[in-house]
Image (tube, rainbow, N blue to C red):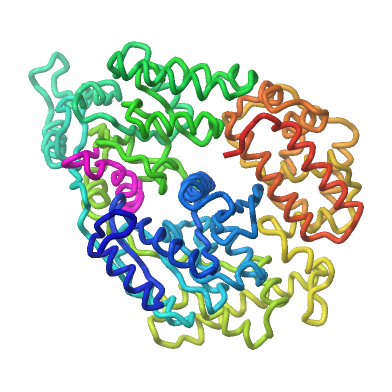
Amino acid sequence: MKFKSFVLDKFQEDSINAIQNGFSVLVSAPTGSGKTLIADFIIDKFLNENSRIIYTAPIKALSNQKYKEFTDSYGEGNIGLITGDLVINPEAQILIMTTEVYRNMAIVKDHTLDSVAYAIFDEIHYISDLERGYVWEESIIFSPDHVKFLFLSATIPNSKEFASWVGSIKSTSVKIIVDDVRPVPLERKFFDSEFGLCSLDEIKKKKELDNIPDYNSLMKGRHRTARVRKPDFRDLIAILDNKLPCIYFVFSRVKTMEYAATLAYKNQYLSREEQKQAISIASSEFNKLNKEILSLKTTLKLRECIPKGVAFHNAGILPELKHIVEKLFSKGLIKVLFATETFAVGINMPAKTVCFDSLRKYSDSGFRYLTSKEYFQISGRAGRRGIDKKGLSVAMIFRPSAELGRIKQFTTKDVLPLQSQFKITYNTILNMINQHTPEENKKILTMNFFTYQKLKGATSNRLLGSIKARFTKASNLLTGLGYIQDNKLTELGLFTTKIFGNELEVSQMFKGDLELDEYSILLLLASLEYEGKKETIFQKTFENANTRKLYKQIQSNSVLRRGDWPRNIDKLTAIIHPLYHGKKFTEILKNTNLLEGDLIRILMRLMDKLEQIGKASNDKKYLLMVKNCKQIIRNSLEGIHLF
């Protein structure tokens, strides 16, 4: 069977046959095996049948990439993009959106979904994500019954359990299509400062010898471990030789840039002809940018690296710069790319080799080892179909501190099952009360994946009772705060159904007790949305009598004074004061050490929240202020492309 001139693999053919027969489909296949071709088939099929298709992605970068790809393939008029802060052609037949946006549409019964034939969930394993997994779960639970699904993921050990759950709550059967064979075999190696490329077992044997006292050394009885040198990324890249191009993953945005600059300073990875090509393409792209962007440190650093065949890519750099890097990488003109893990999520940029600077990363609960899902997702970028006979994945190991047993567990096989992260948010509760009868809500509370996994077909009044008790407790709190009255939503409750994330705080800000103007709206929302980091510096803040008065008003509100977010108000004046007074993006950057992409993220989250408030409020005064706030942000970002 052929599609788009490709001879299909069996799993692709089986998936397409299942779609032709009207089934929902769960495709579990290795990274780089061609799962997205099945999504292309659905789009082709239903575009011709005048039905709507929704393609959801876990991150905006992937949504933006898919928008570009689909626009090239199917024409601008057929494709729309909705990412909260950015809306393009929302009436299009093919809509690409983040999973959060789809969930928000589903839970409020948005009419956009009335004509949807299939919803495509790329990277469905995100349902296990500790912070955001519930979004995927609710997206499925609240999807209209007529919508069928295409779920795409790398290995899912409990695919039968997941498919069975979906089939139990929706009026669709889910066909499971599994393919375990990588089109390009993957070789997994480790790098030790003494042994170079080797296996984990070889490192283990050496570590056992390290623990034997060395009586031949000058310091009698000293363990050999004390002399082990930490591995250096330059040493690893130096021995890769004919195994380039390589994506070197670093779990630090700052380090991606430091490593790239260090490597490019003394190394040249391009031939003369390749160098000419890289400079020509890069110059053409840089000439499209405004002077302010060209003067940024990251731009200057990238321009120094590119002629050497080296680059960096992370969420902290501007979208324009990421686009240039991606274009050069796809043409084989970047031989060593230092990237953060977002580059491994769905973005189709394979290399011959993938390297890990570390197998540990920082999370909200501190440093931890990668999961098997994370390790294999990133490793899966190694090996280009039709080009490489095999891909190579290499992880740096510092053997004195490495827990080799744990590392072996998650680097041998992806054994991590999909796991529910079910939770009930205030927004969900308010929408359930607004959209459903009490009897329907009792049923909805039993439909989550968490309950299905716990009960496995049995009945537990205790478990179901505890979930209903959580619902009742939260409903009582909302009633006490004035969101619900006589089992119906008040005006404040209806407002809050359209606020997604920090919904109680935002609704309390706009219920009329605070003295708001455009400046205070921007400052409060930025303080609420800001995720602080210890290393962030704000050069100059602008606290005054008005901000102190605002802080006092917040402290008198039982909801708003909770948590640490009010402490952000003073420091966030460093961004909001120049923003409000008409300063451009690049000028605002001078007042902080935030990376460009981090400042963009704050402003885009502001736009997203303002968009939600604009849809939620009926107050003309607030609507005008929200409109003005959005314009203030747009003026600041003039000349900056957002994707």
**Quadrant the C terminus occupies:** top right
Q: Position of residue 71 (x, y in %)?
A: 51, 48
Q: Residue furthest top?
A: 266
**Quadrant the N terminus occupies:** bottom left
Whether residue 138 sits left or right of residue 85 in the image: it is left
Q: Is residue 97 visible?
A: no
Above or below residue 57? Residue 164 is below
Above or below residue 270? Residue 141 is below
Q: Position of residue 531 (x, y in %)?
A: 62, 42
Whether residue 622 sits left or right of residue 27 in the image: it is right
Residue at the spot x=46%, y=61% of the render? 43
Q: Is residue 107 visible?
A: yes
Q: Nearer the viewer, residue 54 or 481?
A: 54
For residue 565, what is the image quadrant? top right
Q: Position of residue 80 (x, y in %)?
A: 59, 54
Q: Position of residue 123 (x, y in %)?
A: 42, 56
Q: Nearer the viewer, residue 578 or 229?
A: 578
Whether residue 291 sits left or right of residue 366 in the image: it is right
Residue at the spot x=38%, y=64% of the render? 418
Above or below residue 278? Residue 404 is below
Q: Is residue 283 magenta?
A: no
Counting every numbered tag in the picture gives 0
Q: Nearer the viewer, residue 482 or 414?
A: 414
Q: Where does the magenta region start and end?
A: 370-393
Q: Nearer the viewer, residue 136 or 484?
A: 136
